[in-house]
Image (spheres, rainbow, N blue to C red):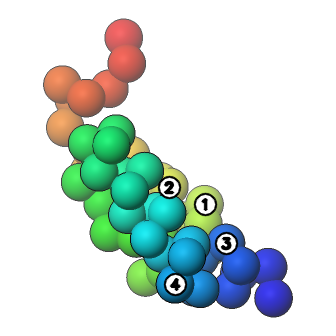
Amino acid sequence: MLRHLLLECPFARQAWHEVLAWLHIPAPNPTREPSLMDWWKHAEENTPPSLHKA
């Protein structure tokens, strides 16, 4: 139920899309990874260094 509310429902998918676009993070929505933590690590690894905070 929680996974659905945070990751899978249409509103959550749109919210993730908007947040990632606003932050310029080149990552897919987090529904493709087994867990939110796995997705976060993958997104962090694939974010260009110029977008990392100093």
Residue at 52% of width from left, 84% of height from top? Answer: 10
Q: Can you see residue 45? A: no
Residue depth check, mark 4 versus mark 1: number of the one nearer the observer = 4
Give, as a three-letter code, the residue at label 2.
Trp
Task: Name the residue tied to disc 1.
Answer: 37
What is the number of the mark on residue 40?
A: 2
Label 4, label 3: how far apart the Cα atoms are: 10 Å
Decide which of 11, 6 is in the foreground and name it: 11
Q: Residues within 10 Å of mark 4 (few under 14, many from 20)?
A: few
Give, as a three-letter code, the residue at label 3.
Leu
Residue at 36% of width from left, 11% of height from top? Answer: 54
Give, as a three-letter code, the residue at label 4.
Pro
Find numbered disc 2 in the image and state the secondary structure of the residue it sits on. helix
Residue 43 shown left or right of residue 39 in the figure: left
**Total number of numbered labels?**
4
Task: Name the residue tied to disc 3.
Answer: 6
What is the number of the mark on residue 47?
A: none
Asked if 27 appears above or below 54 in the picture, the reply is: below
Task: Answer with the quarter of the image where residue 11 lies.
Answer: bottom right
Residue depth check, mark 4 versus mark 3: number of the one nearer the observer = 4
